[in-house]
């Protein structure tokens, strides 16, 4: 088994754990847990808030209107959903699409942490406030959307959630513009990884605006 096959096996085993998870009360109301999907070597990871009704029914992330919009946005920069890894802060749908509770987010943290360790993306695009707060708890998305923050060996790029952008024309414009900056940010991330490691890059993993 080569390294890629080993990582794919680890990711599949993790997904199986997520589907059987009972770490928080959301397990009692879900139809399907939604671990996430995408290539194990994806350089770009999108992290949303949590599954909605369509995702709960299918077990796949971003398959409703927001997912269709996300695919349209990816197409503007020459990518498809098969090129990126897509997941959420919480892996089960909160009832009536309410905001996830702190204990629910905490219950899912180990799963997201393992996904990040296995996939090791160069860039994390957070979609919406709850995903952003995982790395940038003191920021406001209306002020920092589309900016890139160095976090250890990665870049964190907060953006509006596609579902929220569909409801707000101004945010939709911001999201479309932010996506068009991603190719430039991808080049920044690759240059950062190829550069010799320095103490500042690998110290403490505190986000820094680039």
Image: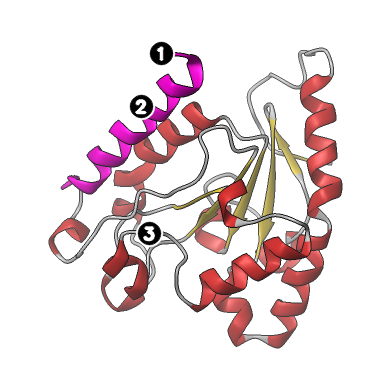
Which mark sits nearer the N-terminus, 2 or 3? 2
| 201 or 111, nearer to the observer | 111
* Classed neighbour count for the residue bearing mark 2: other residues with Cα under 10 Å, few (<14), some (14–19), many (≥20): some
Earlier-in-chain disc, 1 versus 2: 1
Q: Whole-percent x and y of residue 123?
A: 67, 41
Q: Mark 3: few, some, or many residues within 10 Å (few <14, many ≥20)?
A: many
Q: Is residue 85 left or right of residue 195?
A: left
Q: Secondary structure at mark 2?
A: helix
> What range is drawn magenta here?
1-22
Number of other residues with Cα within 10 Å of mark 1, as a class: few under 14, some 14 to 19, many 20 or more: few
Residue tagged 2: 9
The residue identified by callout 3 is 60
Q: Which residue is mark 1?
A: 1
Tally of numbered tags: 3
Quadrant assignment for the C terminus: top right
Q: Residue 86: horizontal and vertical position, in percent?
A: 51, 52
As helix, strand or loop, the secondary structure at mark 3 comes to loop
Q: In front of the other: label 3 or label 1?
A: 1
Task: Give whichever of 17, 84 is nearer the camera.
Answer: 84
Q: Which mark is residue 32?
A: none
With 86 as the anchor, is 61 left or right in this view?
left
Residue 136 in view = no
Q: Quadrant of the N terminus?
A: top left
**Residue 208 part of the magenta-drawn span:** no
Q: Main secondary structure of the magenta part?
A: helix
Measured Cα–Cα span from mark 3 to mark 1: 27 Å
Q: Residue at x 59, y 86 (%)?
A: 167
Q: Residue at x 79, y 31 (%)?
A: 190
Q: Label 2 to label 3, Cα distance in Å?
A: 19 Å
């Amino acid at each position: 088994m080569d390294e890629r096959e080993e990582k794919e096996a680890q990711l599949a085993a993790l997904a199986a754990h997520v589907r059987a998870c009972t770490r928080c009360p959301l397990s009692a109301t879900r139809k399907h847990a939604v671990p996430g999907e995408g290539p194990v070597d994806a350089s770009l990871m999108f992290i949303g808030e949590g599954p909605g009704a369509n995702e709960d029914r299918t077990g796949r992330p971003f398959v409703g209107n927001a997912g269709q919009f996300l695919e349209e946005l990816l197409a503007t920069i020459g990518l498809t959903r098969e090129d990126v890894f897509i997941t959420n802060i919480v892996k089960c749908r909160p009832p009536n699409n309410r905001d996830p509770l702190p204990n629910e987010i905490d219950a899912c943290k180990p799963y997201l942490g393992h996904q990040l360790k296995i996939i090791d993306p160069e860039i994390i695009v957070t979609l919406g406030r709850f995903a952003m707060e995982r790395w940038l708890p003191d920021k406001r998305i209306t002020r920092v959307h589309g900016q890139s923050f160095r976090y250890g060996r990665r870049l964190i790029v907060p953006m509006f959630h596609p579902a929220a952008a569909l409801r707000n024309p101004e945010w939709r414009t911001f999201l479309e513009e932010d996506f068009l900056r991603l190719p430039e940010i991808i080049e920044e991330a690759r240059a950062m990884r190829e550069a010799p490691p320095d103490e500042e890059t690998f110290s403490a993993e505190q986000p820094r605006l680039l």
